[in-house]
Amino acid sequence: MDTLLILERLDRLEKLLIGSKEVLTFDEASDYTGISRSYLYKLTASGKIPHSKPNGKMLFFEKKKLVDWLLQNKRRSQQEIEAEALTHSMRHKNHR
């Protein structure tokens, strides 16, 4: 089997395994989020990203908290804004 094909399969398997875990190591969190290791370290050192350090050395990340952190400060789409405006105007129109 071609070495490149084997590496691709290993990469896919690794991603599947990470996908089923609830708690991620530092390297897994970096891979999962796409955040570079150096920037992830800066985020943990400054307390800007939720993490645990149970033994004072290794860092761990709860996947759900990572996802919540990644999705903070959501921006609504133009379609969502227009639908909300329409709903608001209809409610306001009915209360007159």
Image (tube, rainbow, N blue to C red):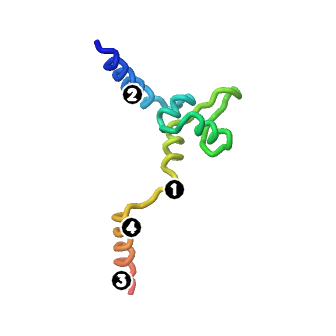
Residue 93 tag number: 3
Residue displayed at 36% across by 83% down: 93
Sooner in the amino-acid sequence: mark 1 or mark 3: 1
Of the 4 image quadrants, the one containing the C terminus is bottom left
Seen from the viewer's position, the closer of residues 12 and 19 is 12
Sooner in the amino-acid sequence: mark 3 or mark 2: 2
Q: Which residue is mark 1?
A: 73
The residues bearing labels 1 and 3 have C-alpha atoms spaced at a distance of: 31 Å
Residue 29: x and y, percent?
A: 52, 33
**Neighbourhood count class around disc 3 (C-alpha, 10 Å): few under 14, some 14–19, many 20 upward:** few
Q: Quadrant of residue 49?
A: top right
Secondary structure of the residue carrying tag 3 is helix
Which tag is nearer the camera, tag 3 or tag 2? 2
Amino acid marked by disc 1: Asn
Amino acid marked by disc 4: Ile
**Neighbourhood count class around disc 1 (C-alpha, 10 Å): few under 14, some 14–19, many 20 upward:** few
Q: Which residue is mark 2?
A: 16
Q: Which residue is mark 4?
A: 81
The residues bearing labels 2 and 4 have C-alpha atoms spaced at a distance of: 36 Å
